[in-house]
Amino acid sequence: MSEVLSFDTLKEQVADGTIDTVLVCLVDMQGRLMGKRFHAGHFVNGAYEETHCCNYLLATDLEMGTPDGYASTSWEGGYGDYVMKPDLSTLRPLPWLEGTAMVLCDVLDHHSHAEVPHSPRAILKKQVQRLKDMGYDAMMATELEFFLFEKSFDEIRKDQWRDLEPISGYNEDYHILQTTKEEHVMRPLRNHLWNAGLPVENSKGEAEAGQEELNIKYAPAMDTAEFHTIAKHATKEIAWQQGHAVTFLPKWHHEKVGSSSHVHQSLWQDGKPVFFDENDPLTMSPLMKSYMAGLLKYAPDYTYFMAPYINSYKRFMKGTFAPTRIIWSVDNRTAGYRLCGNGSKAVRVECRIPGSDMNPYLAMAAMLAAGIAGIEEGLELQAPATGDVYQGDSGMIPNRLADARHTLHGSAMLRAAMGDDVVDHYVRAAEVEIEEFERVVTDWEVARGFERA
Ligand code: ADP
């Protein structure tokens, strides 16, 4: 990535008092930033070399529990340390926090200093490198959809997440008037991210009351994952600063449309797009067709990485713009995979399956692994579907977390591409979610059966 803040500039800014705090972060399994807030003086004096964290950070759940069953990390193993090694090429200011910069870390084994294989950054780096070894670069973009609410996170939590009121009263898809009313959140979000070095394209209202979308320009896959992670984090912090809450839950209410995170993808070679072929009727190169055939063939294998929680699967509903089938189509928003930009060098595939809760490092790594498999196997792409793709029942997306856990567990392709240890780690993460959901009594069960059962 082109450098946003060099270490030398950081040192100068620390010396003149512009920066006093450096957030030293890793990206966890859920795609969140975890780490420590360093005094910037201490960071530039030596802590930039490395710091440490408890190794449960890559074996925990959304609530920071310590579930058992992970080979890498356990009570038995004593929950020791990982090394957090700052990757200084990721240094950037965070303009929405006063005097603050941040850096992302590689996560290393405490003793061997080898990269921890199930760390999300390591997982994506590995697939990007495989592609590089074949002579290609992955250019990707992720869309971020979320809901903005009237009240703050703290008020909503104290109200037990009941009676949630989105910030607007009606569907605000492309709506300029309604989104003007949200500019106290969205304008600082766009501007602060831009000033942090993220190539923000735009934000827009989405197809439900209170729903927003943020678009960031496509970039090499590692940068895209970083942009997504920082943008999602910033969205929560800036909304919080303005007294509001946001949610990236894919389906916060069963009667509302869900939130997605579509992933646009194209391969490039020596700075030129190689998905484009002017002689093909749809301007798709043979390489693009094999890549897409791999994406489609292996979609059940990597559904878990696009939909990692129980709630993720409630989004896949007909007639909501969320897909239900593993099928591709030309500029058609009812299909899981949409051909975009055909007729131009920007020809690309948009995968519409991931929810707003995906970890971009994991989802993009899995898609690249599938695309690489498609190229290596020389797969043929079936003809595109047409019309309302919701009609029909072939190629359904696994529609429960348990099904996606099963297909992930059985994926020879992902085991070969990522390693058994990595796949087994995330299979366990899926099981933890399922076990917890099955243990807990939900509001729905109580309301339905309390009197009537
Ligand atoms: P949509 O109709 O889905 O809103 P956009 O034109 O807004 O389409 O583009 C969506 C995303 O696709 C943007 O983030 C953009 O940067 C990205 N994109 C554009 N060209 C490419 C490409 N060649 N490869 C990957 N992503 C791309």
Image (cartoon, grey):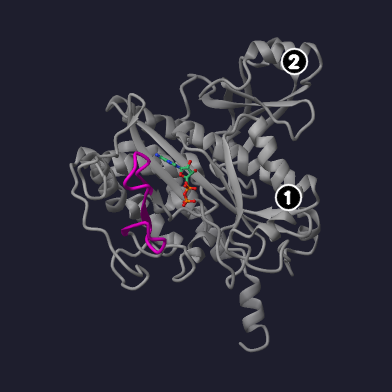
Point out which mark residue 13 bears. 2
Does the image show residue 312? yes
Kindly identify the residue that appears in the image at 74 percent across and 70 percent down: 163
Q: Answer whether residue 346 is magenta in the image.
A: yes
Which image quadrant is residue 46 in? top right
Reply above or below: 89 against 155.
Answer: above
Report the image quarter containing ligand 1: top left
Reply above or below: 131 against 167.
Answer: above
Point out which mark residue 390 bears. none
In the image, 283 versus 425, the foreground residue is 283
Mark 2 / mark 1, whichever is N-terminal: 2
Q: Answer whether residue 270 is magenta in the image.
A: no
Query: Which is closer to the viewer, label 2 or label 1?
Result: 1
In the picture, measured across the screen, residue 170 lies left or right of residue 264, that is right
In the picture, measured across the screen, residue 333 lies left or right of residue 56, that is left
Number of marks in picture: 2
Residue 153 in the image: state x and y as whole percent. 76, 54
Kindly identify the residue that appears in the image at 26 percent across and 45 percent down: 283
Q: Is the shortest distance between ligand 1 and the CB of mark 1 under 8 Å?
A: no
The quadrant in which the C terminus is found is bottom right
Callout 1 amino acid: Glu
Callout 2 amino acid: Gln
Q: In the rendered structure, are the residues bearing label 2 and label 1 in contact, judged by CB atoms less than 8 Å apart? A: no
Q: Main secondary structure of the magenta part?
A: loop
Can you identify the residue that label 1 sits on? 183
Q: Secondary structure at mark 1?
A: helix
In the image, 371 versus 107, the foreground residue is 371
Q: What segment is highlighted magenta in the picture?
A: 327-349
Residue 105 in the image: state x and y as whole percent. 57, 26
In the image, 153 versus 441, the foreground residue is 153
Reply above or below: 196 against 18.
Answer: below
Residue 217 in the image: state x and y as whole percent. 51, 38
